[in-house]
Amino acid sequence: MTLPQNITVPNLSGERFRVRYHLTGTEDEARANADHLRNEQTVEFPTNLLPEGDLSERIMGQVEDFAPVADGVFSVTISYAVETAGAELPQLMNVVFSNGSFMSGVRVERLELPDSLLSGFRGPRFGIEGLRERLRVPDRPLLCTPIKPMGLSPERLADMAYRLALGGMDLIKDDHGITNLPFCPFEERVERCAEAVARANRETGFQCLYAANVTAPAHLMLERAIFARHAGAGALLISPAITGFDAARQLADDDRLDLPIVAHPAGSGNFVSGSEARYSLYVYYGQLHRLAGADAVVYMNYGGRFPISEQDCLDAKGGCRDAMGHFKTIFPAPGGGMTLGRIPELREFYGDEVVFVIGGDLHQHSADLTTNVREFLKLME
Amino acid sequence: MTLPQNITVPNLSGERFRVRYHLTGTEDEARANADHLRNEQTVEFPTNLLPEGDLSERIMGQVEDFAPVADGVFSVTISYAVETAGAELPQLMNVVFSNGSFMSGVRVERLELPDSLLSGFRGPRFGIEGLRERLRVPDRPLLCTPIKPMGLSPERLADMAYRLALGGMDLIKDDHGITNLPFCPFEERVERCAEAVARANRETGFQCLYAANVTAPAHLMLERAIFARHAGAGALLISPAITGFDAARQLADDDRLDLPIVAHPAGSGNFVSGSEARYSLYVYYGQLHRLAGADAVVYMNYGGRFPISEQDCLDAKGGCRDAMGHFKTIFPAPGGGMTLGRIPELREFYGDEVVFVIGGDLHQHSADLTTNVREFLKLME
């Protein structure tokens, strides 16, 4: 024993947050894994060497609930002292699921975060209501499309943005792979696209927003976002699975920007896709993205070109739109193989508080992009 | 067709980088997935609408090689124009594997990056040789241990660091879950621990390095690293799966810091663990961490408390130590259930260019930490 006995940890409020995990296996395995997990995510220390008192009873996670939910699947709720997460998003993510990601059959299902923890985060700056206000679209589903493909010049992308905005597109975003490329430099593209969308808005009277892709090296992200703001971009696009969630949070929190954040799921299949997926879409696209300040979260829709289930999509929707302390509700933004023909079905499925992300099918429909947007919009009425 | 025909993309050098993927399924499925992948990772556009010329032939990924490697597993090499990745790490990761992470049965096996792409990155500042120089340990395996458990005060952690350094520990790192906590504030801890290790070094004549955990909110990471540098920390600890890889790269590149980077695998099980793992350990802990400037990479060892295979560990070792353009070789740092008894076997397995990360067993061995370190070190001679 290398530690003194009965260590008291100061500054513990007694408040705890809870994480509901699903553990796969026999009941004995699940109980052993729950015990491993509550240690691994906090003290990460041999239990036999851990002093009694605060370290064992308050700092180490505590199993609050254990119940079967399906054959060979157990729902386990572990509580953690709010102080273990500080008010820092990377540390919260660290306590929720860090070394646990190496265990077999563990999935993060839900976060239950008390107000005392949530109050350390601003959350989404705009949310559903704020984004609707900026767009002046009070109630129908929103339409969003990327400008692409990679390889087009800033001039051609701006021309495409103009034609899309003229048709009444709500949100026009850089494709997630179009960042700062030798054949499409960030600054030139953002200036041209923002100008093109502003020109279309003057003609239509609409308030289409152009979301500039600021997924960038860590030391340039804020700089590019500020550039985009000054160039007239109306929103920012970021891929949190690549930049880290806190990079999005930093942009959402910055008063100099004051721009809606659209999150792209590039790379997030590592977390949510497949039978071994380690996060529910509720936590990943809903709760974590709201902590990171996103106002709309793009994810892969069911029935598109990726294997995602209807239940997963309901989960994503719930994570975005269910109550979460003082946080605003945000837009689920399903995409990844959306077609004109599916809009009525999907409107039924999602309701109207949704952003439909339309890519290829908008180009398939006819050679006239502006007309195509109008066709899509008719289905939103 | 909404795009003009035969678009020429300027500024393409003709240089390409290659990614070797493993695709699981029948040959027909694998061929279809390869075709999907080369599109999805670049243009992400319906192939029938893609103009002939540069967009189809140079910007879209090209399948260079397709071969069976096992029953139902195919090795597929796709090449991409180096310009699609710019010289930005987030964008390189984006082209290597973004939406592809949602496809079933796709795993990133190897990156083949030409010098023209690698030259855009500094890579590890110290590497094996540089870290050995700082430690003045020319040839044996290095020993590393975390100070923990979470819940200890800065004073107690500093006392632990002192006793460890006195025994001859090479690298002492904050545990990955010990960041900036109400009961263990970053600044007080780093000052005390750096001082304690310096004091021990004066007594022993060794050059033990203390690695301060700078895994932090995006806007505070650099600030904390600079604080740690001034407080006398000898290295920085960061968890790239949580902060994003480019946050590590930013710290490695900063001349004001000039400190070795130790990477921790918190959260990386999402990428490398399980039968559906989407990255080989070669790419993830080796190639990506070297692009991110890490000098030593902690990962879970085989035979410890997580399900990792010997082959995976050989893979991680190879990714750290194989030639990679102008990049320095770096230390594989296996941990996660290391014991005194296993050191001879693991030394055989890894050779001497390795950091052994010892946690719990160092505390199990006897109540005298300083003696325990000496016992471990004897096995390194």
Image (cartoon, coloured by chain):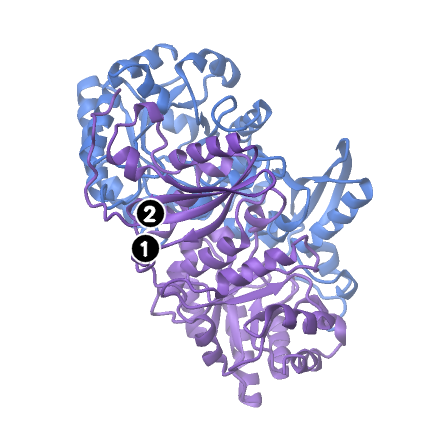
Chain colours: A blue, B purple
- Tell me where residue A130 appears, x and y as whole percent: 38, 29
Residue A109 placement, left or right of A188: right
Residue A97 locus on image (x, y percent): 61, 48
Q: Can residue A88 be seen in this view?
A: no
The subunit letter for the residue under badge 2 reads: B
- Residue A309 lies in what quarter of the image? top right
The residue identified by callout 2 is B85
At which x and y percent is residue B248?
Answer: 43, 59
- Badge 1 vs badge 2, beta-carbon distance below 8 Å: yes
Q: Disc 2 marks which amino acid?
A: Ala
Residue, disc 1: B117
**Chain for mark 1?**
B
Amino acid type at mark 1:
Leu
Furthest residue in direction right, as rendered: A28
Against B243, residue A344 (above or below) is above
**Mark 2: secondary structure:** helix
Q: How crowded is mark 2: few (under 14 residues within 10 Å), some or many (20 or more)?
A: many
